[in-house]
Image (cartoon, rainbow, N blue to C red):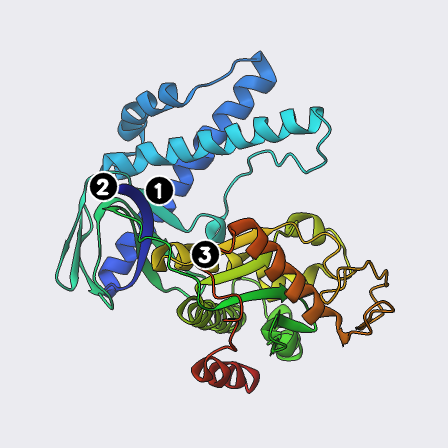
């Protein structure tokens, strides 16, 4: 089998000295200034003279700007060029959305906006200008910064993104290309269907339910208290900076908890089964419901399914996405159509007498549709065992948070 090229991102924590942190902040400040300067130029020329400005015309102007603003010479040239490309991409996305709206799609077109301090938090080394040596990252025009290499970097680095979080932590994100053969699909001995939801984060075709941790919902009271405290602080005061940092740290904790939960759950499934079936969801459409948007975003179904897909591909297992239309209405026992509203939590079939939780019924139907899609060659159809004990322990641990 021919080798394929895969793209992957490795994220490492940086530990800059106080002086290096000042240099990094200055780099971000200059990149943000350049972005806003060229955005203003594009807007002004189009509004007054209907002149369109192109990406490479603005890249050529960087040399002139360096004479007017000598500080730009302290920033690696490719970083500055990437700022212009980032702006150009923002305009391309804007024009794409305008075109889609003309064709009937309803969405905000989102004209590119000027970037404030917290809205411009990264700069990119597109090709060169960086080198990783042991626990040090050497950056052109910045210096050698201590880095926590918690796992080996696999593949050839193509770009490096240096990012600042709202809690003033710095990270190096390497985008790499890896050439390797995909493992052959495993013979299916154990298969599972899953149905994601809000009451239970996940329901399996074996009748197991993983509770929805609701990290944001559980932290809302504490978050509201800190935000009220923050709003009372005087603008631009040191106390306001401290309170802003407390809010940011709580949001960061919620994000970290959620990611940890999703990674452990998706890894447990990928290690335990050779086929995982799940439904194809229109999450963008679902979050338009103002009553459910926050809960759906807190659950992070999309992130979970993304993790499941790439972990399945790396492990050589089947991750089958199926159209889940009417999976709750069809009886998993006999195939009869049993209409029910969302308020009805039990599936009761008048034909075969099956009484089962509606989500378990849906998960069983999802699994059966996936098996029909893949085909039963080499499948032990009875091998739909329960999630491994370690997985249960993790689920219990999640629920205790």
Residue 79: % across, % down: 29, 38
Q: Vertical placement of 345 versus 131: above or below?
A: below
Which quadrant: the N terminus? Answer: top left
Residue 75 shown left or right of residue 122 in the figure: left
Q: Nearer the viewer, residue 350 or 314?
A: 350
Residue nearest the observer in this picture, 36 or 3 = 3
Name the residue at 56% across, 52% down: 321
How far is disc 2 from disc 3 in space, using C-alphas?
50 Å
Q: Are marks 2 and 1 in contact (CB under 8 Å)?
A: yes
Residue at 41% over, 55% down: 310
Sort mark 1 into few (<14), some (14-19) or many (20+) by Cα contacts within 10 Å. some
Which mark's residue is nearer the viewer, 3 or 1? 3
Q: Quadrant of the rendered structure where residue 247 is?
A: bottom right
Query: As displayed, is residue 117 above or below residue 90?
Result: below
The residue beneath circle 3 is 318
Q: Which mark is residue 116?
A: none
Pick the front one: 269 or 306 = 269
Tell me the element at label 3: strand
At which x and y percent is residue 271? 40, 70
- The earlier-in-sequence mark between 3 and 1 is 1
Q: Which numbered tag is attached to residue 74?
A: 2
Front position among marks 2 and 3: 3
Asked which quadrant contains residue 123, the reply is top left
Q: Is residue 229 visible?
A: no
Q: Is residue 320 left or right of residue 27?
A: right
Say which of 144 and 148 sits in front.
148
Q: Are marks 3 and 1 in contact (CB under 8 Å)?
A: no
Task: Count residues near mark 3 (Cα–Cα under 10 Å), then give few for <14, some for 14-19, many for 20+.
Answer: many
Give the alpha-carbon distance from disc 2 to disc 1, as whole Å: 10 Å
Residue occupied by mark 1: 30
């Amino acid at each position: 089998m021919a080798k394929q090229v895969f793209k992957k991102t490795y994220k490492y924590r940086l530990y800059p000295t106080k002086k290096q942190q000042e240099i990094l902040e200055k780099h971000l400040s200059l990149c943000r200034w350049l972005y806003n300067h060229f955005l203003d130029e594009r807007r002004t020329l189009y509004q007054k003279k209907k002149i369109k400005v192109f990406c490479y015309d603005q890249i050529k102007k960087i040399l002139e700007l360096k004479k007017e603003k000598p500080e730009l010479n302290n920033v690696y040239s490719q970083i500055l060029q990437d700022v212009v490309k980032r702006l150009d991409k923002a305009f391309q996305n804007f024009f794409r959305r305008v075109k889609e709206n003309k064709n009937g799609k309803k969405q905000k077109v989102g004209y590119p906006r000027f970037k404030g301090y917290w809205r411009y938090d990264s700069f990119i080394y597109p090709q060169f200008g960086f080198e990783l040596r042991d626990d040090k990252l050497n950056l052109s025009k910045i210096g050698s910064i201590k880095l926590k290499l918690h796992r080996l970097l696999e593949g050839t680095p193509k770009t490096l993104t240096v990012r600042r979080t709202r809690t003033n932590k710095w990270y190096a994100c390497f985008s790499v290309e890896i050439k390797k053969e995909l493992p052959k699909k495993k013979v299916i001995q154990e298969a599972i269907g899953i149905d994601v939801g809000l009451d239970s984060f996940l329901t399996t075709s074996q009748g197991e339910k993983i509770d929805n941790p609701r990290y944001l919902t559980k932290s809302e009271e504490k978050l509201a208290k800190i935000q009220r405290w923050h709003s009372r602080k005087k603008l631009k005061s040191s106390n306001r900076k401290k309170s802003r940092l407390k809010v940011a740290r709580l949001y960061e904790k919620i994000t970290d908890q959620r990611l940890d939960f999703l990674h452990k759950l998706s890894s447990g499934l990928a290690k335990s089964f050779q086929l995982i079936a799940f439904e194809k969801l229109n999450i963008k459409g679902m979050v338009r419901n103002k009553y459910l948007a926050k809960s759906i975003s807190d659950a992070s179904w999309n992130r979970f399914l993304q993790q499941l897909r790439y972990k399945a591909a790396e492990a050589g297992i089947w991750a089958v996405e199926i159209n889940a239309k009417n999976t709750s209405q069809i009886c998993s026992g006999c195939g009869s159509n049993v209409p029910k509203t969302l308020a009805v939590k039990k599936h009761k079939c008048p034909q075969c007498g099956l009484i089962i939780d509606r989500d378990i019924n849906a998960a069983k139907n999802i699994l059966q549709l996936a098996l029909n899609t893949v085909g039963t060659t080499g499948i032990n159809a009875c091998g739909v065992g329960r999630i491994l004990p370690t997985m249960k322990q993790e689920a219990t641990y999640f629920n205790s948070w």
